[in-house]
Structure formats: structure tokens, C-alpha cells
Image (cartoon, rainbow, N blue to C red):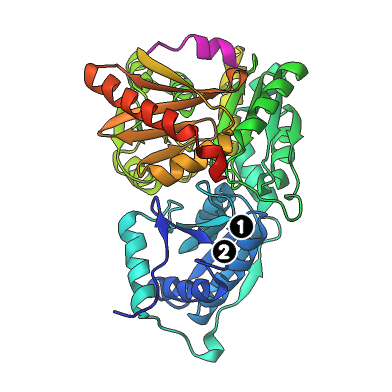
Amino acid sequence: MSDVEALPVKKGRICGTANIQLTPENMAELGAALGTLLGEGSLVVTARDYYPPSRMLKRAFSSGLMSAGITVMDFHGATLPELAFSIKRFGAKAGIQFTVSPFRENNVNLKILDSTGAEFTYDRLNELLRLYETKHIIRTIPKRIGWVSYAEYIHDIYVASLTSFLDIDPILSFSPRVVVDSNFGPSSAVLPDFLSEIGVNHITLNSHKPPIHRSVSHLPPIESLFTLSKIVTAAGAQLGAAFSADASRIVLIDDRGKILTPDEITAIIIKFLPENSRIAVSYTMSKLIDKVAEQRKIKVSRVKGLIGDISKHIRRIRAIFGATDGGEFIFPHFSIAPDALLTLGKIIESLSISEVNLSKVKNELPSVERYSVEINLGETTPSMFTEYMVNNFEEIILSISGIKIVVKDTCIYIDFIPQRNKIKLSVEEPSGYKINILREIADNLKRDLETLPQLY
């Protein structure tokens, strides 16, 4: 075993601080390791968000791929859905996406997709990391070094394919208005054309590159969701949406300004799925999913693991839909990877066919009993609190709209209440055991929140 320093891995993805944990040097080595794993002569597609460190690290990674004889098709700034789509279209062996991390500002996540467009599973990622750490890398001779090309029309091809996947006529008749926050990501390169093609009146926010020398985040800050909510109601829009930096995740806001959780979005999508079908979701998703699925005679498989594990399970059981409580949604007939743009399109399509507003569908969802406790945030901001939770809880799920933690096999939901400067902790189907765990966590948080502002 080599003494090379191991790359940091969080939630099944390589993730670290640019120029400290992830450097041009070790990314070039990792690229060569992936090239060795795939074999000389393979095609790999690459993309990034608009965060400058993502650009730097992707270029270094590409040089490593080339050194192993890999042909690189570079999409520059492009979304994860476009990357996954292009893998199938061009017959690539893998796809690589560099994007800012959801767990900490200024960290970069490396998402590696296989030849089907699904993210690497734990086993596949560990196989790659073993090659990197042992330096069992095979570089090619000079005349076989790989080439880099650019697919100039990938945005147009993706939009055309996405549009053809939807029933546009009901949308044109319904003529909805939506407000979408691109969160300074490359979805801004495809979103206006996509919405125009399907006949949606739209307002786009933060649809440009990040302001220079300012920190960016993978998930839109909770404060920006509150602003988006106000714009949706002021504009009289049918719904609002906010994307993650790579457009792999989405959160929806209904026509009354209510921010929907990933559980609620999943339940709403299930309401419009064909009866007697199969779906795969994260094992920690709400019991709401089971209640709605039962109404539709839909079989639910709960999967423990990463988004790649859910994609793998979708293929195995031939499911027609997949979801995580992080806000990732998969429609495998189009792509096996999560796609925020397609999710938005499918929601708009379903509402248009039924000619209903999102708030009506949301209000018709069945209820799930919960026990809740509210805690004052004091001087602690939502971003401070989120970073604290990431640092102190191992099993944590971040979505654009909230947080879930799993403690002693109990899933605890944490929602922000900005109007009262509070957070709400809750558990579903409360028992004495669950309530005691919730109260213990709440007491610990109350104590720590008193000193938290001085630490940031």
C-alpha cells in the first residue's frame, strides 16, 4: 500500500476543500486512476458548475484521464442532468461532475457516473480509490494520449430531448407562470429555452455566474427560499422552484408561497403516476409516501444507501420513479440520474393536465401524525445552524428546504420557521421512545445554540 494521502469521502462522494484536500496534483492522479479502471480508448464526458475551484479541478482531472489514453468530451459549465443524458447519447464509459459541496461552502464534490448515467455505488467508488491509493496506474505511450473535444450543442440537444419527453399541449392550454431560482448554476444556460419551448411564462432569478470573490453554496440558502416565496405570491405564479448548483436537486413553492418538503413533492408526483407501478425511495422518507402510494396501488421499495444505490435498485425492479429526501428525483425512462429540470417539467405537465394549482394538490395529501418541539434560534442564522448540524451529526440529510437527522434509528425532521426565528423538530408516528430521543436532542440544541454565534 502506498503512503499517498487518502482522499476525503462524504456520503459516498469525494469531497474536500480546493487547494488543500483536493489539489490539481491529486485530481490528475485520480483522473489517471479512473482512466486505468475504464481502459485505454474509452470516452469520458466531463462538466462543472460555475464555481472557479470546480473549473480548476476538472481541468486537472481531465489531464489525468488523457494520460491514460482516455478521450475527454468536455461540456464546460453544464448540469448533472445534461451530463447523465450525454453519457447515453455518446456511448461514454463514465461522466464526471465537479460541483460545490452541499455540506460546506468552498468545498467541492466530485460526482462520478457510470456508463448508464447512475452515480458510482460505494463498491465502485472504493475500487477507484484503491487504484489511486496503491498507484496501480497505467499511463499510455505519447502517441496514444487522449484528446479533448467540446460538444458545442449539448444544451440544445438536451432541451430538445427534454421537451419531447413531455406532453406540451396541456401546458400550452394551461399557460402557467413559474418563478425559478437557478442558484448561480449552469441550469441558466438551458432553463429559459426549456420553459419557452413548453409554453411556460417564467421569471428566472440568479441565472448568472456567481458574484466574484463571494462564497457560493450547492443548495440555495434558506433565506433565498423565503424571498422566492414572496416573489411567487406577488407575481401570481402557479409555482416556484429553486435548483441546486448542478440542477440535480429541486425544491418547489406552491401558489400560496408554501415551501414544500421533498417528502411532499414525492407524494405529489406519486399521485400522478400510473396505478400498479413500482417506485424506489430513500429508506428515511416520510410515511406520507406509503399512504399516497397505497391509494394509487403503487409498490414502494425503500433503499438504504446513496443515490447510486437507488438508481441501481430502480433498474433491478423496473421502477418508473425514484426519489430521495434530499430532493433528488429520477424518471428512469428518460435518465437514471436525478434531474431537477425534468422534475419541474413533469410537475407542470401534471398540474396542466388536471388544471389544478399546486396548493390544492398539496392540501389533499393525507396527514401523518407528528410530535413537535420548537426552539428559538436567537442570534444563530440558518446557515450557522446547518453547518453546526453537519459537523455534529453523522447521519444527516440536507435538502434545499430543511434537515433530517437519524439518531438511534429515529428520523428527526428539522424545519426553519423564519417568521418566529425558530426551528421545529418533529418525529412521525410518535412513541414514548421517539419522543424521549427528540427531547434529548432538543435539550442539547438549546444549550449549544446559546454559544453558537460566538463560534462563527
Q: Name the amino acid type tagged 2.
A: Ala
Residue 448, given in percent of the width and then of the height, sits at 44, 35
Residue toward you, 384 or 235: 384
Q: Residue at x 64, y 18 (%)?
A: 257
Q: Check the image and report above or below for 351 versus 19.
A: above
Dividing the picture into quadrants, the one containing residue 182 is: top right
Q: Check the image and report above or below for 147 versus 46.
A: below
Is 110 on the left-hand or right-hand side of 195?
Answer: left
User: Where is mark 2, residue-wise?
Assistant: 18
Q: Name the amino acid type tagged 1.
A: Arg
Residue toward you, 406 or 38: 406
Start-end of magenta stretch? 358-368
Q: Residue at x 28, y 26 (%)?
A: 437
Is 13 on the left-hand or right-hand side of 213?
Answer: left
Dot 2 lies on which element?
Answer: loop
Mark toward the viewer: 1 or 2: 2
Residue toward you, 34 or 104: 104
Of pointers 1 and 2, the one earlier in the residue sequence: 2
Residue 266, given in percent of the width and then of the height, sits at 45, 26
Which label sits on residue 391? none
Dot 1 lies on which element?
Answer: strand
Q: Check the image and report above or below for 278 versus 209.
A: above
Q: CA distance from mark 1 to mark 2?
A: 14 Å
Q: Check the image and report above or below for 62 versus 195.
A: below
User: Where is mark 1, residue-wise?
Assistant: 48
Residue 104, given in percent of the width and then of the height, sits at 53, 49
**Does the stretch in magenta take in 367?**
yes
Dividing the picture into quadrants, the one containing residue 171 is: top right
The N terminus lies in which quarter of the figure? bottom left
